[in-house]
Each structure stands twice: as structure tokens, then as C-alpha cells.
């Protein structure tokens, strides 16, 4: 990924959603993925928070990439991420108190997410603002998609509901709601995701 | 050497810009955040006041743990005639000192500073607040305990509403960091509303059981969904009556959170009843005129 390489918006989005999906492909930030996917709503809210911080940090780093000294880039990235996390935390607390009450738990976790700093290092520090913005969008959406995908599976089987709406009058397998089940769920769905992608590529190659 | 300086300067500038940005955002948002929090608290409290109460006055008592010279006492910030006073009592309820508190006491940070000034030395740590809702003639309509209890992970901040007879009117969860989907269910009506209607005697004996919540009980506890589900409030109240004296049903998968919150509510209410008696008699002994008339007088 050398500088000056041409990226299109669609290519960046597809990259984040499928080709380099943070959860299913890069296997980064697995802790939140295990912990926060026992229902769809949690996955969505956490995904939203990551999307914002990823895009904001990507853009900041790509703007100042020539200023940040090579040897202290990691601490510099952490400061940038922490700044954006704090800004969104304070901003939401003041101007969207209802929404903040639900999302506050997730926002504070983001500082230590591996996916964010890895995208800063791999992509934003070597590219201009516009591709970095779309790379952040792609990664954020990919993360959100993966979490919601796992969430659908676990919430339906664990609680018999989706997005908090009861679909079944009973809980089919409560096991899937418990934290350890996150490992099983992600493992199984990762295998499914890779299998589907491989089938799709083979089908496209034959055509 | 030059390299070293360059690196240090670079990181310094980044930190400086970041700190500056955070400072600006903080000063712009902090007041709004506090206003929101206060509004939410008032909204939560208003839910437990009678609809025809008329003008309601709130009197807040803030409790502090005072550490001074190797001994620990309890400090109460009381609204009195002409301002606020800090009344320091020893564990037996004897008056150690009374000092006027200068400055606003509604905001926690400002109050901490005011209490520090009022104390001649020693440390004061904020514990909890009792907010009394009084009608125009000074009669107590309801009392609110704003306190905290240890949850499964960190502190759970609670608001317990009590009626004039000290029976529980309701429970609100103000802040918590329990796990979404498990411990976080303490926010839900089907858990919180199980506390409503418990008298002090019942509360003393209240336990937690690991039994599934009966479906009809759950439906009647989810009061805010009655209208949407087309439920007749009168019939539903009867259903709740049937279960009203059972122990608290633990949340599935979050027995510890359920137990801790239940213990917290019990402890807060028991302490409130005991301490209000102590504060009222101590304030009278100290010659203070609290801005809330003692009960029954």
C-alpha cells in the first residue's frame, strides 16, 4: 500500500466490509466482539461509536502524518484516539443525554481497540485525507456489520428476540447469551463468512 | 541530541494541542452536562410525587464521612434558616460541631469545596444525599435517597423513592456499568418495580430468589407498556398485588447484580430512617432550625 495508490470509495467500503473485515478477517478487537454481541442493539451502538472514532482519527492522522515523528507515532496515535474518544464522550453527555445514557459504556472502551490504531498505522499514516476517510468508514461499517451479524445469531438463539423485540415466547438456548458463548459464536460465524466468501469468489471466477 | 529534542518537542506539541482541545470542549459542555443530570434527577423524582401536590419544595441533606485526627465522624450538610450548615456528629449521634457553610451546595464539586472550607481540618468524603419533597405547609410528601451500592462490576448509583410512611414508592437506577444484556437489566422495569410498595418491615426481611419471573407478574411490572398492550390498569394492579409480598426475583444470568442492588436498597432505606431521627434530634440539640419540619410535628 504505497502512497499515491489509487483508491475508490467503493473499493474502500468493500475492503472494510468484506476483504479486510476487522472481526472476521483481521481478527482484531475480539474482546469487545465477544463481550458486546449478546444482542443486536449492543452491536449496533458499539459499531456506531467505533465508526465515529475510526473516521475522526483516520482523518486527523492523515492530515498531520508529515508532522508526526516516525519514532513516536504510536504514542501520538494513542493521544489522537483518546482525544476523539473524550471529545465524543463529553459532547454526547452534553447534547444527547438520552443517547449518551445508552452508549456511554461503549464509548469509553474504544481507546484500547486494536482495530483503530492498526488502521492508523497501516493506512491513514500513508494516505491522503479522502481515502483515509473512506477507509475509516469501511472499517467502522465492517466492524458494525460483524458485531450485528454475531448479535443476530446470539440474541435470537439466546433470548428468542431481535433488537429487544420478542419473537419467541421462550429462550431457545440461553447459553448463547452468556459471555463464553461469544467465542463459539464468533468462531462459527467466521468460518461461515470465509466459506461464503470463498464460494462467491469461485462462482465469480467461473463466470 | 537534536533528534531527541525533536522527538520530545513533537510529542509535547501533540499533547498540548490535544489538551487545549479537550479543555475548550470541557468548558463548553460541562455546564450543559450538569444541567442534564439535574434535570434527569428532577424528572425521576417528579414521577413519585402526587399529581395534585401543588407547589413542591425540595430540601436536600448531604452526608459526608469526616476523618479527623484518626477518628471518623459523620457530617451532614443541612438546609437551615438563612443558608446551609455543616453538622458534625460522632457515631453515637452527639453533636461535635456546627458551622455555617458558605457557597452553593447543589453541585457536588462546589459542595465538596464548601465543606472543606467549613471544616477546620481533616478529610471529608461525600457519601449520599437525602432529598425531602415538602408541600407548602412543610409536610413531607416523599423522600428520595440518592446513594450507591457495589454492583457486579463497579458502583451502581441508585435513587430510592419513599413515601411519608417510609414505604418504597419506587427505585431508579441513575448510573451503572454492568454488562449489557445481563447485569444491565437492573434498569428494566420488571426488576425495579418489584421494590414498589414494600414497607419498612417487609424490606427488612426481603430476600432474593432464583426463580423465574411469572409471565403475568412481569406484564404487570412493565407499567410503561400497559397502554401499548391495551391492558386494563385496575385488573393489572390486582395481579401485582398477588405477588407483592414475594422476595425479589433475580434477573436470569445476573443473580449477583440483583442481590447487590437489593441489599443496597435495604441498607440505604434502613440507614435513612435511622439517620433522619438522629439528624432531627441532633439539629434540635444544636439549636439549628432545619428548613424541613420534623415528621409528625
Image (cartoon, coloured by chain):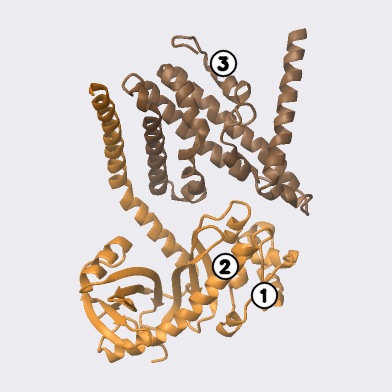
Chain colours: A brown, B orange
Looking at the image, residue B176 lies above or below residue A126: below
Q: Which residue is mark 2?
A: B260
In the image, B229 versus B143, the foreground residue is B143
Subunit bearing disc 1: B
Report whether A39 appears left or right of B78.
right
Q: Which residue is mark 3?
A: A11
Contact? badges 3 and 2 (CB < 8 Å): no
In the image, B66 versus B7, the foreground residue is B7
Q: Residue at x 66, y 76 (%)?
A: B244
> What residue occupies the far top of the structure in this picture?
A207
Q: Residue at x 39, y 70 (%)?
A: B127
In the image, B290 versus A73, the foreground residue is A73
Looking at the image, residue B184 lies above or below residue B202: above
> How far apart are the alpha carbons under marks 2 and 1?
14 Å
> How far apart are the alpha carbons under marks 1 and 3?
58 Å
Quadrant of the image occupied by residue B119: bottom left
> What residue occupies the far front of the structure in this picture?
B1
Amino acid at each position: 500500500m504505497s502512497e499515491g495508490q489509487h483508491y475508490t470509495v467503493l473499493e474502500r467500503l468493500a475492503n472494510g466490509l468484506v476483504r479486510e473485515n476487522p472481526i472476521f478477517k483481521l481478527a482484531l478487537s475480539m474482546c469487545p466482539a465477544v463481550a458486546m454481541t449478546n444482542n443486536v442493539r449492543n452491536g449496533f451502538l458499539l459499531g456506531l461509536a467505533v465508526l465515529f472514532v475510526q473516521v475522526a482519527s483516520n482523518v486527523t492522522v492523515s492530515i498531520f502524518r508529515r508532522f508526526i515523528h516516525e519514532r513516536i507515532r504510536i504514542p501520538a496515535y494513542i493521544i489522537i484516539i483518546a482525544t476523539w474518544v473524550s471529545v465524543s464522550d463529553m459532547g454526547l453527555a452534553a447534547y444527547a443525554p438520552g443517547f449518551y445514557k445508552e452508549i456511554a459504556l461503549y464509548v469509553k472502551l474504544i481507546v484500547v481497540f486494536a482495530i483503530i490504531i492498526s488502521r492508523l498505522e497501516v493506512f491513514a499514516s500513508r494516505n491522503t485525507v479522502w481515502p483515509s476517510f473512506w477507509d475509516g468508514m469501511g472499517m467502522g461499517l465492517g466492524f458494525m456489520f460483524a458485531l450485528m451479524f454475531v448479535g443476530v445469531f446470539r440474541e435470537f438463539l439466546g433470548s428468542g428476540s431481535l433488537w429487544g423485540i420478542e419473537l419467541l415466547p421462550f429462550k431457545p438456548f440461553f447459553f448463547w447469551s452468556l459471555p463464553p458463548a461469544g467465542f463459539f459464536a464468533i468462531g462459527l460465524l467466521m468460518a461461515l463468512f470465509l466459506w461464503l466468501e470463498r464460494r462467491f469468489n469461485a462462482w465469480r471466477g467461473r463466470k | 541530541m537534536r533528534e531527541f529534542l525533536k522527538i520530545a518537542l513533537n510529542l509535547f506539541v501533540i499533547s498540548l494541542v490535544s489538551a487545549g482541545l479537550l479543555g475548550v470542549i470541557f468548558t463548553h459542555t460541562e455546564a450543559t452536562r450538569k444541567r442534564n443530570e439535574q434535570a434527569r434527577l428532577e424528572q425521576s423524582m417528579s414521577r413519585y410525587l402526587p399529581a395534585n401536590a401543588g407547589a413542591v419544595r425540595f430540601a436536600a441533606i448531604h452526608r459526608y464521612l469526616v476523618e479527623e485526627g484518626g477518628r471518623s465522624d459523620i457530617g451532614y450538610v443541612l438546609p437551615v434558616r438563612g443558608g446551609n450548615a455543616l453538622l458534625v456528629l460522632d457515631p453515637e449521634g452527639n453533636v461535635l460541631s456546627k458551622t455555617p457553610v458558605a457557597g452553593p451546595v447543589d453541585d457536588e464539586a462546589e459542595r465538596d469545596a464548601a465543606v472543606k472550607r467549613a471544616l477546620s481540618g481533616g478529610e471529608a468524603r461525600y457519601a449520599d444525599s437525602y432529598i425531602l419533597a415538602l408541600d407548602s405547609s412543610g409536610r413531607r410528601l416523599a423522600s428520595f435517597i440518592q446513594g450507591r451500592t457495589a454492583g457486579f462490576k463497579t458502583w451502581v448509583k441508585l435513587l430510592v423513592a419513599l413515601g411519608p410512611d417510609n414505604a418504597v414508592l419506587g427505585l431508579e437506577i441513575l448510573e451503572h456499568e454492568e454488562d449489557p444484556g445481563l447485569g444491565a437489566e437492573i434498569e428494566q422495569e420488571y426488576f425495579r418495580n418489584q421494590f414498589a410498595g414494600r414497607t419498612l418491615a417487609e424490606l427488612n426481611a426481603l430476600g432474593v430468589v432464583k426463580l423465574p419471573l411469572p409471565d403475568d407478574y412481569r406484564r404487570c411490572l412493565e407499567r410503561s407498556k400497559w397502554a401499548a398492550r391495551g391492558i386494563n390498569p385496575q385488573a393489572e394492579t390486582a395481579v401485582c398485588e398477588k405477588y407483592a409480598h414475594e422476595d425479589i426475583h433475580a434477573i436470569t444470568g445476573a443473580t449477583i447484580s440483583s442481590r447487590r442492588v437489593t441489599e443496597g436498597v435495604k441498607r440505604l432505606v434502613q440507614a435513612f430512617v435511622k439517620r433522619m431521627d438522629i439528624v432531627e434530634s441532633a439539629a434540635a440539640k444544636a439549636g439549628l432550625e432545619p428548613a424541613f419540619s420534623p415528621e409528625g410535628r
